[in-house]
Amino acid sequence: MLQRKIVSLLLLSVLIAASCSTVQPDDASEQVDADEFVAALHATIGYDFDPLPDPASALEQSDVAVAGRVVDVVVGLESWRDVSAVSCEEQKRQVLAESPDEPFECFNPEGEPELDDRYFAITVEVDDSFDGEAAPGDRVIFYVQAPLVGDIDELLKSAPRGPVVVLAADEKQPPIADGSHVEQISKSEDNRFLVPFPDGLWFTGSDGAIGPWWTAEDLSLQWGFELETVDDIAEILRNDS
């Protein structure tokens, strides 16, 4: 079950400012380490989850399991919630009636749609497939929940390029709240909505494999193998596929 962490705009601004030192390459074959991108995801998105217990179970639970290279990261989907227009005067009246000592700030009096959810679309060029129908050379889109606050374009400047392992479930469609409408900016050709498990997304960082919600050390302890790099994780999965 997803739980969003409350994060201050100041904290995310610091993370994004640090990430801007990473410049995206023009050539998708060049590598950009995932450290800054992963740090921002970890700080703003939280998950409660049961870890994948071992490599065999991880593959059994996955609809797609691949190793490859991240070649593109964009905002892939946004959902927006319609809200009623409430004038500043009416908002103030309601606030003062309930909490007369609370400071008042008028919010969205015109009733503009509000951003409800956002996903990155991460395109992976497959080198090796351990489960599912993907084949070497295919490009597969995976969806990863993205922050709702801060400058998303600046954050994308730190998006990784390079080796990755992904274990994902096909959610069929985005888990959009009732009353929200979707803007699907990037859509997979087969209409799947592939979402990596929280402990099934492994980018390449400056010190080896790095995940937004699970460390390589955590995975090593859980699976009983010494796993330091994306290649290590891929090799274990390859042996069980």
Image (cartoon, rainbow, N blue to C red):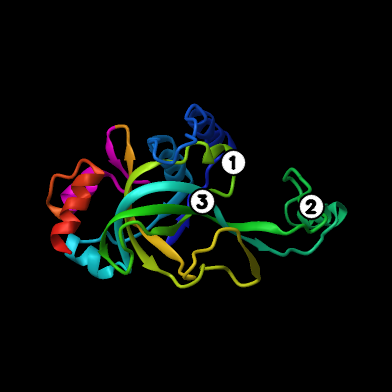
Instruction: Point out residue 98 in the picture as x, y percentages from the top left corner.
Output: 74, 57
Q: Nearer the viewer, residue 182 or 223?
A: 182
Q: Residue at x 35, y 47 (%)?
A: 69
The 10 Å Cα crowd at callout 1, few under 14, some 14 to 19, many 20 or more, is: few
Instruction: Point out residue 9 in the picture as x, y percentages from the top left corner.
Output: 59, 38
Tell me which label, 3 or 2, sits earlier in the chain.
Answer: 2
Residue 140 appears left or right of 82:
left
The 10 Å Cα crowd at callout 3, few under 14, some 14 to 19, many 20 or more, is: many
Instruction: Point out residue 192 in the picture as x, y percentages from the top left corner.
Output: 45, 69
Position of residue 21 relative to residue 214, above or below, is above
Element under label 3? loop
Q: Nearer the viewer, residue 141 or 172?
A: 141
Residue 96 numbered tag:
2
Q: Magenta region: which residues?
A: 207-222
Mark 3: which amino acid? Ala
Mark 2: which amino acid? Leu
Q: Residue at x 49, y 28 (%)?
A: 18
Element under label 2? helix
| Residue to which mark 3 is pinned | 146
